Amino acid sequence: MSKSLTSLKRFWKNKKVFITGHTGFKGTWLSIFLNMFNAQIFGYSLKPEELSLFNQTKIFELCKKNFYSDINDLKKLKKKLSQSKPEIIFHLAAQPLVSDSYSDPVNTFNTNIIGTVNLLEAARNIKSVKSIVIITTDKVYKINNFNKSYVENDEIGGKDPYSASKACSEIIVNSYIESFVKKGFLKNKISTARSGNVLGGGDYSKNRLMPDILNAINYNKKLVIRSPKHVRPWQHVIEPIYGYLLLAQKQYQKKITNPNHAWNFGPRKDNFITVNQIIKKVKKIKKIKKIIIKKSKIKETKILKLNSNKAMKNLNWKPKWNINQTIEKIITWNDLTKKNKKMKNICEEQIIDYLNN
């Protein structure tokens, strides 16, 4: 067993952890991590989609409590947080898609902005809480389309409703830190975490590249893509989640003194590639019937890269898997599920492989 795996198990054992958005793709992977380390998981989320990794892995059976409710319901959120008495909180509840933010901007702003306010307000008077990690996105930065990697103190912005809502949530976190933390509330124990474009088994979201690729492979369909030349910081979902866990742990242990609450958890530099390059790499392993380029009306940044030196220096975290390894893990996950292997077991095996790498 690796030192990192031993250390995580020792720290997280019996820790009471409250996760908002635990039924989502990233929330489910986080829950699997924490269950492996024998944490007590309290999940607060909308009910999962019928086709979801959460249902397929039966994570609901592993949680101490599953609270199915809306993050915008402050009264209920306060009640469930108070009942759970968590030590650590991960806030992942969100409307996570740029495309959906155009079709429903009101829900996007309500969920991503007011939801963050509600979480912080509900946690403010819970004395058991010792660490909070708010998950945002790489898209919080004010985009200039230059070929540079964004660092945490770069200006935030956001042209589309999703990106703007997440940038606003960063401002809200900073406001709570300035208004309440410096007066004693969880000093140096609230952070925001910004990952790249996460990939992994069990993502069934619409209008996302890897789920669309797997659908094309599994059902011999045409693959429709929007922006083949756009560059993104692609990474396996395990990479940033491991970073979130380290960040929450260091905050709990009072080992975070950096005044900037934001943290980037991006991929290796060789993972900054185009949509086209991702597809070409998949085609070396699997056959894709036909690719259709459908120009999108949605405005998206052309180039997006992250600099994660801060996390590498202060948390002893680093991205491990290159894009070829990431794609290989996803294809393997997809193939094994078709052979009826238990999805939870596949996820756990890939997590252990990552931690032992």
Image: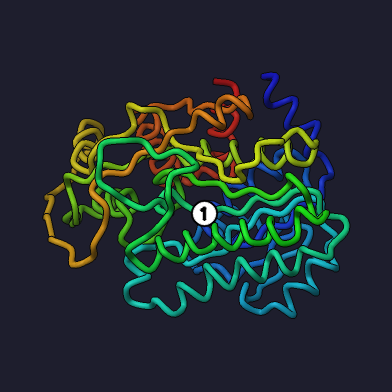
Picture coordinates of residue 236, whole percent (x, y) = 44, 38
Picture coordinates of residue 92, whole percent (x, y) = 58, 58
**In the image, what residue occupies the spot 43% across and 33% down?**
307
- Name the residue at the right extreme: 127
Nearest the eye: 249 or 40: 249
Nearest the eye: 355 or 74: 74
Picture coordinates of residue 94, whole percent (x, y) = 52, 65
Q: Which quadrant would residue 355 be assigned to in this image?
A: top right
**In the image, what residue occupies the spot 45% across and 37% down?**
266
Image-based side of 20 in relation to 284, left or right: right
Considering the numbered disc 1 on the image, is that residue within a helix, a strand or a loop? loop
Label 1: which residue? 136
Picture coordinates of residue 180, whole percent (x, y) = 75, 60
Image-based side of 271 in relation to 25, left or right: left
Question: Could you tell me if residue 199 is visible in this image?
Answer: no
Q: Is residue 55 above or below residue 111?
A: above
Q: Is residue 356 above or below residue 195?
A: above
**In the image, what residue occupies the spot 40% across and 35% down?**
332
Question: Could you tell me if residue 275 is visible in this image?
Answer: yes
